[in-house]
Every structure is written in C-alpha cells, then in structure tokens.
Amino acid sequence: MSETADFLVELGTEELPPKALGRLEQAFADGVQARLADAGLSMGKLQSFATPRRLAILINDLQLHQAAQKIEKRGPPTRIAFDDDGKPTRAATAFADGLNVTLDDLDKLTTDKGEWLIYRGEKPGLDTARLLPDIIAAALAELPIPKRMRWGSSDIEFVRPVHWLVMLLGDVIVPTTVLGVTAGSSTRGHRFHAPEAIELKSASDYESILREQGRVIAAFNTRRQRIVELAQSIARELDAEVILEPTVLDEVTALVEWPVPVSGHFDAEFLRLPEEVLIATLQDHQRYFPVRGTDGKLLANFIAMSNLDSLQPDEVRKGNERVVTPRLADAAFFWDTDCKTTLESRRAALTDVVFEKTLGSIADKSSRVAELATTLAASLGANEKDVRRAAELAKTDLLTAMVGEFPKLQGRIGAYYAKLDGENCTVATAI
C-alpha cells in the first residue's frame, strides 16, 4: 500500500457573499475531488469548510505518489510501417520518434481487422505535492462566480480579495502561489476575537485549532446546527417556539464564524400587522428569527445571531432592537396607507402595468383569466360570481405599497385587503 498523508487547503478571503457561500463550498470540494480522481490519486474522507472568511478542504489519507501509468499507443498498420523488404518506412520511424522510443521498443498487435505497430510502456507517477498546485488552481478557477473582482494593482480576479493560503500535506507546506498568495501553514481566526496568525503544525489539526484558538467554527453544517441549538435555547427561555426558515438559517450561518445569540424585543403595537409582514420584515430585512407563543401567535420578540461575543451584550441587544424598529414602522405605514384604498378602486390602474408588450397589460391578463375561470367554474358547478370576482381582484395588490416592499407576499396581502374591503372569505382565499 502506498504512503498517505492528510491534506489541507484553506483560502482566506475578505467576507464572501453569504448567499453564494454554500454553492462555492460544494463546487470547490467537487472540483478538487474530481481532479484528484483524474490524477489517479486515492484518498479517504473529504471534508469541506466554509465561513465568511474562508473556503477549505481537508482530505484524510491522500496518496503521496501517483502509481505508474500503463501506456498503450497504436501506430500505423504494419503493411504501411514496413516496405516489401521488411525495412521500416517513414511511418514507422515517425511513430517511434513521436513517442521518444526506438523501433525495438515497439510491438505488433494482431486483430481480426489486421496488424498494427503498438507501443506498450509505463509512465512513472509523480509526487502528489507536485500535482496539488495545479489541481487547486484549476478548481478555484472554475468556481461559479458570476462577478469577479480585482484588488490592488494586479490582474488577479476572484470573488473577494485573497489574504492568506494554507496548503499542508501532513506537516509539510506544499510550495506554490495561488491567486497571488504564497502558501504557508498560518491560518487566521475570528477577525476580532483572534486576529493574529495561528500556526498549524499539521493538516489534521485544522478544525480543532480554529475552534479552540481562533474562535471559529469552520464547518458550515456544524455552525448551522449550533445556531439552531442556541436559538431554540433562547426560545425555551421565552416559553416560545423559534421560526427557523431554512434559507434564512443558511444565510445567517454564512454571516457568522462564532455565533452568539441575541434575544430582542419590539413594540407590541406592531403585532396588529399580518404575521406574514412581521416575519418578512424580521427575516428578509434583518436576518432575525421570529418566535411564536404557545398559542401559535407571533410574539413581540426576535432572536438574532451576532458574530461577536461582546463584553456589553445589552448594548448589542439594544442595537438590534433599534435597527428593527424603523423597518417595522415602515411596514405599518405601508399597511395603513394601503388600507385607505380598496382593491376594486385599483383595478383601473392595472391598465398601466405592462404584463408583456405583445400580450397587453395586467388588466388585459386579468380579464382573460376571469373569462377562462368563469367558463371552468360553470363546467365544474362552482360559484361563477365568486370565481370571476377573485380573478378580477387577484392582481390588484401589485399596486400596493406593501407588495412593492415585499413582492413575495403578493396574493397573501391581497387576501387581507380583500377581507378589509368586505369581500367574502371565498374570494379572499382564492386571491
């Protein structure tokens, strides 16, 4: 069995785009794994890591030397490779020269289709340390980065400026330069809690050293689970249940390296707003987690995750409460303003909203939908009047301030406004 060692590569950057972090982590791991397989290198477990300031891969038991590769090259047919006197022709010598071998190194291959010259040989394997720089550089070059940026005076491009690079094969640095940074054995911890360089003695120490000395939970899923546990613990203290929407949870995980929970509160006056509006305000604008009471209703509380274990946690809490208040006040203003105008009175304005230039306005589309829906309702025995009314009003909330701020609530907001306008529950539900 060939010798093996653990391999670590870590690329340290400025803060990576949170919504792209998971995709970058997976693509980097897939790219490295595929290229190692192409090189014929065996390996054990591969672990990927991603935080706001780093992408990393740790591979256990990576083969240290390529196995020799068998080579088999078919040349010209022997009837062309040799003349009538059995002497090699230009075709034979050119084939041998192209492989940098002599004619004596060639064999003959006989099949039912004829006989050919063939070369059978062996290509010596290379040390893995010589292959890794190109493998890592190629994997990074193919990451799914829609917009790359430059920094400093170089022409190097990446998703964010690169500040350090670790490449360790066992306890030995792999000598290379990638994205303008020379590989070493020094990583960085949390930007504020552990800003100094941290020396890694071996690749296998990576995750534990970062957590113990660097105050960084490097593994994305481990950090995500930690956030879940912290949020649920705070919720239990409130005798409540935290709402952990997966997309928001992923984004929060991509924003912090050392999650610290913050339990905040907002003015209960805002609870008069629809819960979808409150949840969207807390989640979409602030990346906070809303909480429900035992009765299933939203509480005037939220749970946030700080990337800092502050010496003044009350100030952190007050800061989070302070920034969410204007957001909720805006939502309340949109609600109050929208409630002054009925959905019916907005219908005429839909003629000014283009659906598609060759298909007319949203008003035209609504009319077509109303006709089709009414026809279907008649054939199904449904209430034609309610169906037509719902179709006529279904898109009117596109003109509201609330949907302008929260487009994903289109339809739901319309249902609330329809009820306030006195439309029956069937129409509101259909909207």
Image (tube, rainbow, N blue to C red):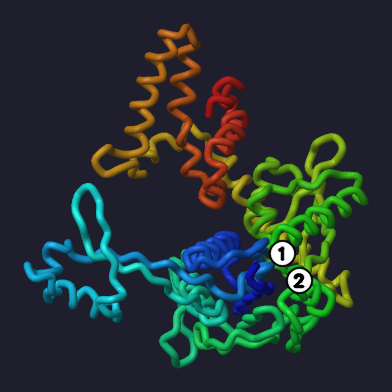
At horizontal 44% and vertical 20% (from top left) the residue drawn is: 388
In the rendering, at what x and y percent does residue 275 appear? 70, 42
**Amino acid at dot 1:** Ala
At horizontal 67% and vertical 61% (from top left) the residue drawn is: 45
At horizontal 82% and vertical 52% (from top left) the residue drawn is: 301
- Quarter of the picture holding the N terminus: bottom right
Q: In this view, does 393 lie to the left or right of 339?
A: left
At horizontal 69% and vertical 62% (from top left) the residue drawn is: 220
Q: Which of marks 2 and 1 is nearer the N terminus?
A: 2
Q: Is residue 93 left or right of residue 431?
A: left
Q: Any mark on residue 219, and which? A: 1
In the rendering, at what x and y percent does residue 377 appear? 44, 13
In the rendering, at what x and y percent does residue 272 appear? 74, 42
Is any atom of residue 2 visible in this view?
A: yes
Q: Which of 37 and 401 is in front in this view?
A: 37
Is any atom of residue 53 visible in this view?
A: no
Label 2 element class:
helix
Q: Mark 2 points at which residue?
A: 207
Q: Nearer the viewer, residue 68 or 105?
A: 105
Disc 2, disc 1: CB below 8 Å?
yes
**Amino acid at dot 2:** Glu
Q: Any mark on residue 18, and which? A: none
Callout count = 2
Label 1 element class:
loop
Q: Which of 1 and 157 is in front in this view?
A: 1
148 versus 296 height, above or below: below
Work out how far the residue at label 2 is from the one at label 1, CA to CA, in angstroms.
8 Å
Quadrant position of residue 286: bottom right
Q: Is residue 385 left or right of residue 11?
A: left
Q: How crowded is mark 2: few (under 14 residues within 10 Å), some or many (20 or more)?
A: some
In the rendering, at what x and y percent does residue 44 appear? 66, 62
